[in-house]
Image: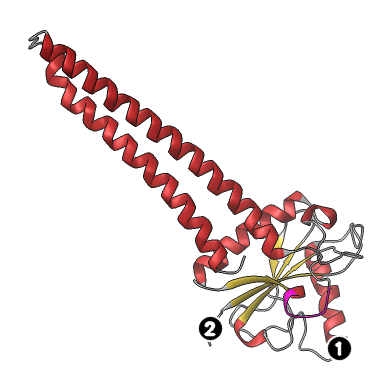
Amino acid sequence: MSRTINEIFVHCSATRRDWMSDQSTEAKRDEIDRWHRQRGWKGFGYHYLIDRDGTVIAGRPEEEIGAHVSGHNAHSIGICLVGGHGSNENDKFADHYTSLQEGSLSELLDKLEAKYPGAVVRGHNEVAAKACPGFNVKRWLRGPRKILSETRTGKGGAVAVVGTGIASIADVADQALSAAHDVSAMADALPALRWIGVALTLAGVGLMLYARWDDLKAGDKGR
């Protein structure tokens, strides 16, 4: 049975960096499964587990209700990062997790957001008095997107400048040839050159506008 998903929660296992470091990700999932069963749950309460080497494995099927956020389980997906022991809700991601985990989490979130449009990504600490997952998810999500937006804006601006320059050169050349009454092949090419410049300018402006729209869209989703 399919579920309506409107939230994606990020959690942590609250374990030390070296916890079961010589064991497989599956073994770690099984150990957390044992903890959850001891609490009287059906078993592993998350839908995904991300190990410190970036390995991602599934827990509960997405169509099955998880056991990870009280009052929010019915319409959410739970992701657990291995680590986070002694963390604070305002720590940085890198304080407790690896770059491999960061890459895997970003990729997994991209897939889930594409699959469940409109779902809001949150940290457990946003809806409960807990440090979990040990960093500010909203801030973390906006950081990479903001950098991407600034990169797109910079590239868009450069393209627009080049396009404007080409169009300007075409206009100057056209005026010079007209004054000299030159009817060479170069004169025939100027209209095309001018349109190339205009197209590049529009493309650059479009890229800048898209960057700002994407950044605002992320902000509207509460990131």
Q: Tag on residue 39?
A: 1
User: Can you tell which of label 2 and label 1 is closer to the viewer?
Assistant: 2
- Helix, strand or loop at mark 2: loop
Q: Quadrant of residue 89?
A: bottom right
Residue under label 2: 4
Q: Are marks 2 and 1 in contact (CB under 8 Å)?
A: no
For residue 9, above or below residue 201: below
Segment tinted magenta in the rendering: 126-130
Foreground residue among 83 and 61: 83
Please, what is the three-letter code of the amino acid marked with disc 1?
Arg
Q: Is residue 21 left or right of residue 59?
A: right
Q: Can residue 185 be seen in this view?
A: no
Residue 99, how many percent across, how many down? Answer: 75, 49
Residue 213, how many percent across, how many down? Answer: 46, 56
Q: In this view, does 103 lie to the left or right of 209?
A: right
Q: In which quarter of the image is residue 183?
A: top left
- Helix, strand or loop at mark 1: loop
Q: What's the colour scheme?
A: secondary structure
Any magenta on residue 128?
yes
Say which quadrant the C terminus sits in: bottom right
Any magenta on residue 198?
no
**Residue shown at the point (56%, 47%) measured from the top left:** 148
What secondary structure predominates along the stretch shown in magenta? Answer: loop
**Residue shown at the point (44%, 39%) measured from the top left:** 156
Q: Residues within 10 Å of mark 2 (few under 14, many from 20)?
A: few
Please, what is the three-letter code of the amino acid marked with disc 2?
Thr
Residue 67, how many percent across, how many down? Answer: 73, 84
Foreground residue among 141 and 65: 141
Q: Distance between the residues labelled 2 and 1?
A: 27 Å
| Number of numbered tags placed on the structure image | 2
The first of marks 2 and 1 along the sequence is 2
Residue 195, how many percent across, how many down? Answer: 22, 32
